[in-house]
């Protein structure tokens, strides 16, 4: 009997090697292909569109009774050739005196199948026309398209194929990331004895990050393990287009090297698109307005840039990075940026574009500096908007600093440093600010006034880095220059910093004189920002001298000035100081109020150092008020934040605070060990011992203290967090829980009383001079602690506890 052969249901090629990663993408795409008739995979060359499409098609075969059919279109140039490729794939022949497209439509009309149209970008208009025509006639035919830009046919679903996931620096297990898995798989295929060691894994991670997770680049790099170590491969990626030149011989020529892949995309661009692409390489990321200002000129009019960016996004050469403060931002993958930068250098435009770029960054930085010290007439959201823009463009600002430094442009570099000082301070990036300022101060510059400004700002950075001697030395030098140039704002700043160094050295008389001069100077020139800061420093001085009433009065004056100009960052820093004075005098209610309002402000701003100090302050007061679980929560958050941002003194203080509470709870052994760890960290970091140090004099606890003193930071922090978690939980030896009325903090009890009188959140906020958001958070805490879920219950609870006549 003759054998019967079932007709083929697909023409997909065999996979020559393993398919790595994209498990979640595959699952989502299979659902999309079932629900949508046209699915287009878009992405830059080498991103893996074809391989992903073939895997989807293979797994979707069961959904299409008439099969899945691949049509490779990389070398076609006309609509007729597209139709012929499709017809050939599914076995349709031409008929005499009839258009093949009509015959194809007739054949496909009753069929349920999937057509995979691969590499369509160079004929995308013709592909769109063919697909549109078939969609109308063949109601059960679906299309899976790969292209560097969408077809824009009706009903199309576009899936932007992302790079493979890359390991973050310090990733615990890089082998879990797709890009590293791909490298290892291909390296083993290239060299069968290739093994993964921790050292190699670190270099492989660097390679994958350097290649943006682009599969083609990773595969080309992995193929080099036959000849080079992974360390050598990582070192040579700086010239990636020359290095990654050998691919699979079976692949099209344009896919055998990384350079060829991008050359192919670049060659398909119009002249204006090519100009814009190379100019965009000066940015790490950008928004439309920035691109227009830097890239637009007579040869590339500004009004055309939006459409050109849209076109480059469609062609998968520009990536949409997301929205930031109402402005859409874009970026280039680093490999594309590297390519475009080479094109920019060869065009002869690089110097002009870099200068435009730096000028825009200088304008942004100086707007930040101006908004920081400006008096009344500017609302906080307006001040804060430029802060967000600096955050978004900080890598661009770094590039401007670097470009100025390489070219010894001292004046522009110093201007950038002076202007960026508020950001460096608030964001906790003092070391970076110090580095750049020192680098430009080391250059020759004739502008003594500008050098003086930079020196004063450098002194402030040194003060916050606990380098008080350097702060005093360079601050005095900067003060002299700023007096000579009649720069009153810089003189006021210098005097304020030098007063703090005097206070550190216990020279209170000198500090008092300097601060009095600041107040007189700032009032005479109308500088409320520097006056407010000086008043707050006067409060700190009075606190050091033990005059808590005067300290509080000075802080109140500072807050009145800073609230008057709606400068919340200044208010937050001042509240921190006032809270510490209140804590020192035993005013727990006042300290809690100050720390919590400062915390709300710092959470919105996001500056790690001040935020950590606020959290620690709230935690300490909570502990003193008997709210132990809450104290552990705030102190643990502060400790974790300090550790993640490298604040060694904050880590040591946080560990000691947790140890102190744990000791009170009876966990004396671990508390002693943790206190030793805190002391050891202070000692190794060059800080003097804390006056509050827990140090057992002898016996087993003293031995544990010494053992803790030698702990590594990560071990010590882990111990602190473990203690906090243990201390939060109910303990068998714990005393009876306090009645509910003592569970509330003084602030919460005050708010509960006002709610009991019938006030709304807004009315409570106005009465207590705090934000409605703060009130809402306190109300939520009250509900949680008392087990309530309505304001009516709070009011009834308060009524029950009112004294009766």
Image (spheres, helix red, strand yellow):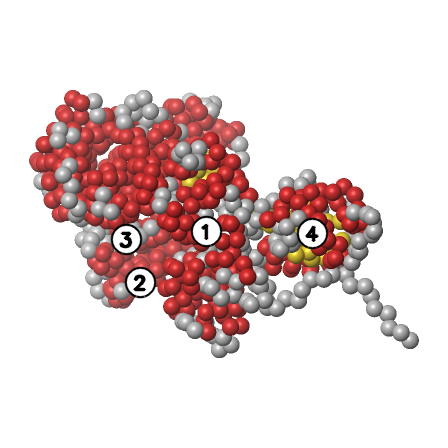
Looking at the image, tell me whether mark 1 or mark 2 is earlier in sequence order.
Answer: 1
Q: Residue 648 bears which disc, if any?
A: 3
Q: Nearer the viewer, residue 357 or 665?
A: 357
Looking at the image, tell me whether mark 3 or mark 4 is earlier in sequence order.
Answer: 4
Mark in the foreground, 1 or 4 = 4
SS type, badge 4: helix
Other-residue count near label 2 (Cα within 10 Å), few / some / many at <14 / 14–19 / ≥20 = few
Looking at the picture, does residue 566 appear above or below residue 53? Answer: above
Mark in the foreground, 2 or 4 = 4
Residue at 42%, 62% (x, y): give it: 242
Is residue 514 rendered to the left or right of residue 338? left
* Quarter placement of the C terminus: top left
Q: CA distance from mark 2 to mark 4?
A: 68 Å
In the rendering, at what x and y percent does residue 138 appear?
Answer: 78, 46
Other-residue count near label 1 (Cα within 10 Å), few / some / many at <14 / 14–19 / ≥20 = many
Q: CA distance from mark 3 to mark 1?
A: 39 Å
Is residue 37 rendered to the left or right of residue 253? right
Q: CA distance from mark 2 to mark 3?
A: 12 Å
In the rendering, at what x and y percent does residue 266 appear?
Answer: 50, 49
Q: Are marks 2 and 3 in contact (CB under 8 Å)?
A: no
Q: Residue 81 bears which disc, if any?
A: 4
Looking at the picture, does residue 586 appear above or below residue 66? Answer: above
Q: Residue 712 bears which disc, if any?
A: 2
Q: Residue 336 bears which disc, if any?
A: 1
Mark in the foreground, 3 or 1 = 1
Looking at the image, tell me whether mark 2 or mark 4 is earlier in sequence order.
Answer: 4
* Residue furthest bottom as drawn: 193
Is residue 408 rendered to the left or right of residue 216? left
Residue at 75%, 54% (x, y): give it: 87
Residue at 35%, 25% (x, y): give it: 379
């Amino acid at each position: 009997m003759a054998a019967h052969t079932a007709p083929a249901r697909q023409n997909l090629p065999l996979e020559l090697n393993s398919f790595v990663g994209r498990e979640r993408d595959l699952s989502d795409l299979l659902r999309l292909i079932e629900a949508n008739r046209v699915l287009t995979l878009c992405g830059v060359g080498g991103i893996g569109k074809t391989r992903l499409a073939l895997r989807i098609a293979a797994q979707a075969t069961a959904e299409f009774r008439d099969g899945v059919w691949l049509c490779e279109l990389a070398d076609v140039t006309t609509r007729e050739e597209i139709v012929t490729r499709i017809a050939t794939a599914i076995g349709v022949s031409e008929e005499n005196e009839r258009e093949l497209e009509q015959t194809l439509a007739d054949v496909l009309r009753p069929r349920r199948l999937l057509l995979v149209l691969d590499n369509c970008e160079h004929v995308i208009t013709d592909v769109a026309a063919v697909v549109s025509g078939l969609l109308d006639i063949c109601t059960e035919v679906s299309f899976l398209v790969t292209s560097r830009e969408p077809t824009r046919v009706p009903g199309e679903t576009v899936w932007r194929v992302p790079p493979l996931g890359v390991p973050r620096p310090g990733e615990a297990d890089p082998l879990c990331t797709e890009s590293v898995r791909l490298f290892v798989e291909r390296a083993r295929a290239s060299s069968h004895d290739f093994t993964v060691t921790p050292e190699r894994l670190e270099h492989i991670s660097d390679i994958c990050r350097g290649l943006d997770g682009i599969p083609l680049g990773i595969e080309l790099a992995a193929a080099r393990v036959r000849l080079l170590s992974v360390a050598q491969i990582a070192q040579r990626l700086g010239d990636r287009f020359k290095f990654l030149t050998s691919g699979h011989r079976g692949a099209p020529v344009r896919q055998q090297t990384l350079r060829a892949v991008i050359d192919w995309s670049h060659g398909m661009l119009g002249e204006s698109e090519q100009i814009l692409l190379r100019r965009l390489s000066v940015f790490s990321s950008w928004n439309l307005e920035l691109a227009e200002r830097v890239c637009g000129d007579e040869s590339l009019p500004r009004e055309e840039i939006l459409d050109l960016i849209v076109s480059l996004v469609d062609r998968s050469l520009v990536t949409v990075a997301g929205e930031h403060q109402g402005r859409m931002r874009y970026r280039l993958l680093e490999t594309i940026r590297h390519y475009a930068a080479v094109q920019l250098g060869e065009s002869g435009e690089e110097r002009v574009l870099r200068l435009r770029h730096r000028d825009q960054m200088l304008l942004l930085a100086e707007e930040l500096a101006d908004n920081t010290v400006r008096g009344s007439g500017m609302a906080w959201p307006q001040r804060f908007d430029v802060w967000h823009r600096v955050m978004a463009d900080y890598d661009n600002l770094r590039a401007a600093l670097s470009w100025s430094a390489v070219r010894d442009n001292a004046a522009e570099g110093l201007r950038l440093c002076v202007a960026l000082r508020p950001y460096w301070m608030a964001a906790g990036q003092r070391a970076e600010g110090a580095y750049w300022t020192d680098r430009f101060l080391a250059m020759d510059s004739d502008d003594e006034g500008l050098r003086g400004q930079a020196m004063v700002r450098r002194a402030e950075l040194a003060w916050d880095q606990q380098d008080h001697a350097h702060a005093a030395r360079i601050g005095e030098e900067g003060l002299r220059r700023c007096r000579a140039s009649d720069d009153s704002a810089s003189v006021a700043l210098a005097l304020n910093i030098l007063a703090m160094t005097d206070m550190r050295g216990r020279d209170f008389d000198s500090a008092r004189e300097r601060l009095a001069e600041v107040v007189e100077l700032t009032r005479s020139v109308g500088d409320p920002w520097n006056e407010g800061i000086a008043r707050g420093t006067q409060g700190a001085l009075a606190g050091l001298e033990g005059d808590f009433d005067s300290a509080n009065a000075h802080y109140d004056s500072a807050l009145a000035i800073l609230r008057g100009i709606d400068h919340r960052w200044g208010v937050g820093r001042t509240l921190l100081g006032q809270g510490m004075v209140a804590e020192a005098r035993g005013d727990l209610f006042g300290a809690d109020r100050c720390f919590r309002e400062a915390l709300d402000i710092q959470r919105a701003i996001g500056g790690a150092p001040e935020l950590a100090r606020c959290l620690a302050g709230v935690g300490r007061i909570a502990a003193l008020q008997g709210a132990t679980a809450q104290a552990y929560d705030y102190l643990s958050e502060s400790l974790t934040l300090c550790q993640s941002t490298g604040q060694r003194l904050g880590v040591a203080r946080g560990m000691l605070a947790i140890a102190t509470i744990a000791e009170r709870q009876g966990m004396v052994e671990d508390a002693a060990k943790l206190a030793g760890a805190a002391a050891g960290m202070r000692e190794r970091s060059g800080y003097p011992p804390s006056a509050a140090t827990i140090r057992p004099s002898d016996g087993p606890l003293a031995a544990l203290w010494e053992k803790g003193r030698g702990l590594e930071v990560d071990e010590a922090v882990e111990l602190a967090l473990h203690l906090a978690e243990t201390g939060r939980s109910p303990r068998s030896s714990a005393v009876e829980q306090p009645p509910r009325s003592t569970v509330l903090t003084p602030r919460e009890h005050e708010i509960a009383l006002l709610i009991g009188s019938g006030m709304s959140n807004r009315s409570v906020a106005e009465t207590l001079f705090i934000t409605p958001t703060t009130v809402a958070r306190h109300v939520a805490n009250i509900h949680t602690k008392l087990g309530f879920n309505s304001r009516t219950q709070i009011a009834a609870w308060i009524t029950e506890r009112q004294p009766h006549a």
